[in-house]
Image (cartoon, rainbow, N blue to C red):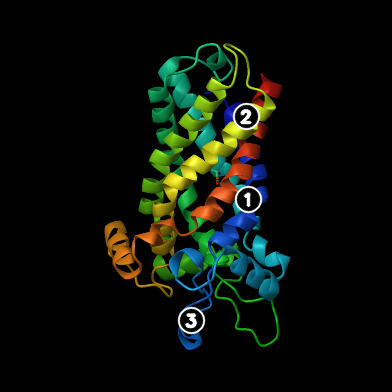
Amino acid sequence: MPVEEFVAGWISGALGLVLGYPFDTVKGQREPSLPASSVLPTQVRLQTQTTYRGIVDCMVKTYRHESLLGFFKGMSFPIASIAVVNSVLFGIYSNTLLALTATSHQERRAQPPSYAHIFMAGCTGGFLQAYFLAPFDLIKVRLQNQTEPRAKPGSPPPRYRGPVHCAASIFQEEGPRGLFRGAWALTLRDTPTMGIYFITYECLCHQSTPEGQNPSSATVLVAGGFAGITSWVTATPLDVIKSRMQMAGLNQRAHRGVLDCIVSSARQEGLGVFFRGLTINSARAFPVNAVTFLSYEYLLHLWQ
Ligand SMILES: CN(C)C(=N)NCCC[C@H](N)C(=O)O
């Protein structure tokens, strides 16, 4: 099993993550609509409550309340973790294609796989990476949803002191299964959308590149960016549900399951709730995935 795709996936995932993290934090931010007395340290943010006036309002309040650091809260942890997850995604995708088509990454330029094979390989990568992503994503969401300014006198202490303390608290309070809270929604979100992710990328590259040649850097950037947008647009509804499942039990009503969360969210806030964060998801997705795919292709080209 060629390992260079895993290594290239790791490095490209880390690069994409740093670029996109401030967007991700704002997506997850919302002023608590609950009375102060009832708001726990882990205040819920954008995708799970109802009151900020919009993304700019979120960004202004985050900067004013928490300075620039507020946009990078909890990033130290995902750098290693999301990079590993991206490594699994790209490594499994490429090696599943190798198993389905008996062609290596380089050979696929001359012998492009079918879109069915690309979709199947993308879904396989999405399904398996979700298992690795779940605990890390839960910790990231819990940390991002803490709005207290760092160590300002008089401010309530945040519930979690950092990623390790967050993981230990969840493990202690909810057991090992607690670290996989929202994992089912995450798997449902990522499996089909990763198929869409890779189909979009490969289709746009194939349409814009002469037969048998490698796509140009500009093609890879644009194709990667649109692949990110397409996959996040289709993933946003379940992304909202996933976030709610992850915050359930803290200051959100615990749900009996994904379906219960979907029905209760729609009933209480209307169908528009499933598209909360869509704009910021899309704005973030283009640069993040453009850089992810460009660095991935560059590294594989360097090593092959
Ligand atoms: C949940 N969906 C839609 C995706 N993860 N799509 C693929 C993009 C992955 C990339 N690391 C990113 O964070 O944008």
Q: Are marks 3 and 2 in contact (CB under 8 Å)?
A: no
Distance CA(mark 1)–CA(mark 2)? 18 Å
In the rendered image, residue 103, in percent from the top left (x then y), is placed at 50, 15
8 vs 221, nearest the viewer: 221
Q: Are marks 1 and 2 in contact (CB under 8 Å)?
A: no
Give me the residue at 59% from left, 60% from top. Answer: 25
Type of amino acid under label 3: Val
Distance CA(mark 3)–CA(mark 2)? 45 Å
In the rendered image, residue 220, in percent from the top left (x then y), is placed at 62, 29
Q: List the residue tagged with mark 3.
A: 39
- Mark 1 residue element: helix
Up-down relation of residue 268 to residue 118 (above or below): below
Give me the residue at 58% from left, 22% from top. Answer: 208
Q: Quadrant of residue 257?
A: bottom left
Crowd class of label 1 (few under 14; some 14 to 19; many from 20; radius 10 Å): many
Whether residue 43 is visible, yes or no, is yes
Type of amino acid under label 1: Gly
Up-down relation of residue 161 to residue 201 (above or below): below
Which numbered tag is attached to residue 20?
1
Which numbered tag is attached to residue 220?
2
Give me the residue at 62% from left, 14% from top. Answer: 213
Type of amino acid under label 2: Val
- Mark 3 residue element: loop
State the quadrant of the C terminus.
Answer: top right
Up-down relation of residue 175 to residue 208 (above or below): below
Whether residue 92 is visible, yes or no, is no
Q: Nearer the viewer, mark 1 or mark 3?
A: 1
Q: Earlier along the polypeptide chain: callout 1 or callout 3?
A: 1
242 vs 137, nearest the viewer: 242
Mark 1 residue CB less than 8 A from any atom of ligand 1: yes
